[in-house]
Image: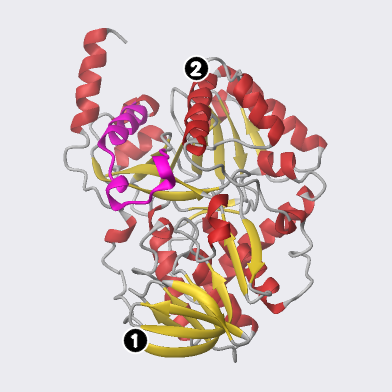
Amino acid sequence: MAPSAMSRGKDNWIASLSEAQPVPYWLEDPGKPPAEPALTGAQTCDLLVVGGGYSGLWTALNAKERDPQRDVVLLEGREVGWAASGRNGGFCAASLTHGLPNGLARWPDEIHQLQKMGEHNLDEIEAAIARHGIDCEFERTGEIDVATEPYQAWELRDWHRQLEEKGLADGIEFLDADAVREQVASPTFEAGLWDRRGVAMLHPAKLAWGLKQACIGLGVRVYEHTPALGLKPYGAGMAVRTPYGSVRARKVALGTNIFPSLLRRVRSYTVPVYDYALMTEPLSADQLASIGWKNRQGLGDSANQFHYFRLSADNRILWGGYDAIHHYGGRVRAEYDDRPETYAKLAGHFFTCFPQLEGVRFTHAWGGAIDTCSRFSAFFGTAHRGNVAYAAGYTGLGVGATRFGADVMLDLLDGEDTERTRLEMVRRKPLPFPPEPFAWTGIALTKWSLARADEHGGRRNLWLRAMDRLGLGFDS
């Protein structure tokens, strides 16, 4: 592109953001339910669930479906679904391991079992949505992992061959450049892997709100604007202090994820990473025809610093990812949810991918924190003689995996020996992150190295190779 054309293009990219509201598109839905009242006074229950995102909601719902007589209370510090559960891209994946490559590298002896359990988990999510009448725009369209560089196309083809050899390629189709562009027309696409059954698209906030209503319908007492301030043993159970009261419970499940755990020893296992997304205005029929996308799959590119993108029910394009921002000290603050420099970068990337959509405007731009751990997928554990269970570290793939994590926590709290609790993935924890300044320095060096790998044909430098050997890293 000539310099003058590049300058005009950049001006157009910036102009596309002029009316973007710095709020999550999903949370602006007019069907948002009113918040439940805050807890006041002292309460008792069999099971207390802390956290009103997917992790806590699935735990409360599954607990009541397992035992309708179980008395369950759920506490949410603000409003159900306001954090990561209402801000994500709405990709509901079957994978429990943050994708097959990560799972195969870490748990090769269990990967077939993990894949089957993940597929069953996604089926159960679809069944629960139907059973409880949750209108969350669920579409089981699959996902295409696209290559945007020739070396990535070669890697995707080789990876598909490996999956076939290991008996893991069922439902996964390799697409060459012509085939992938027939699905979605971008001049940047060189190849793709289409997972036809393993991913669904949905409206993330509507899922959270629907799960909340389902919980209430089964008798769960839900209290919003009620942060849990402290956790301690109380007799044979536990007690949690809140601003206006307290809860005494036989068992406690912690689904707080990115927010500091009530168990101090768990905090070093996760760090917050800020992710950002844009949402376009609805595409016209001609605009939609110019890019194809008739099968409405989710898409993600194959770079280390990757984008994820999908169509909404009203044919907007959500475009997110690439930048992954970790702030020194692991702070989680509201002001980090808005980052104009990332929005400008994402807008430029969007129009590079879809030049035929020049002139489209973005209506929303937002960010939010993801909890990542050193193995990129959830970890689990118990405390206080088995009276407290926790799950965290989903690293951006929690829309589906949190339901599985909820069942793990319930198994652990009930003291059950199950197929889930016997998994090495459940029994072992990731390596914790070092204290500052080492955590920030290591993450910054890893991000720089990943960007250089993207610029140099995927070649990983000495630092990344060392991280690979240790089973560590940082996923954008």
Q: Of 216 and 77, which appears nearest the observer?
A: 77
Q: Of 98 and 426, which appears nearest the observer?
A: 426
Is residue 120 depicted above or below 386 in this figure? Answer: above
Q: Is residue 167 left or right of residue 84?
A: right
Residue 40: assigned label: 1
Which residue is rendered at x = 60% and y = 84% of the image? 237
Residue 168 horizontal/vertical position (percent): 76, 43
- Residue placed under numbered mark 2 in the picture: 455
Amino acid type of the residue tagged 2 in the rendering: Glu
Is residue 145 depicted above or below 390 in this figure? Answer: above
Secondary structure under tag 2 reads: helix
Are there few (<14), some (14-19), or many (20+) residues within 10 Å of tag 1? some
Q: Of 263 and 428, which appears nearest the observer?
A: 263
**Majority secondary structure in the magenta region:** helix
Secondary structure under tag 1 reads: loop
Range covered by the magenta-colored residues: 325-351
Q: Is residue 274 left or right of residue 24?
A: right
Residue 318 seen in this snapshot: no
Name of the residue lying farthest toward the top: 2
Are there few (<14), some (14-19), or many (20+) residues within 10 Å of tag 2? few
How far apart, in angstroms, are the residues tagged by discs 1 and 2?
A: 56 Å
Q: Is residue 398 left or right of residue 90?
A: right
Q: Is residue 241 magenta?
A: no
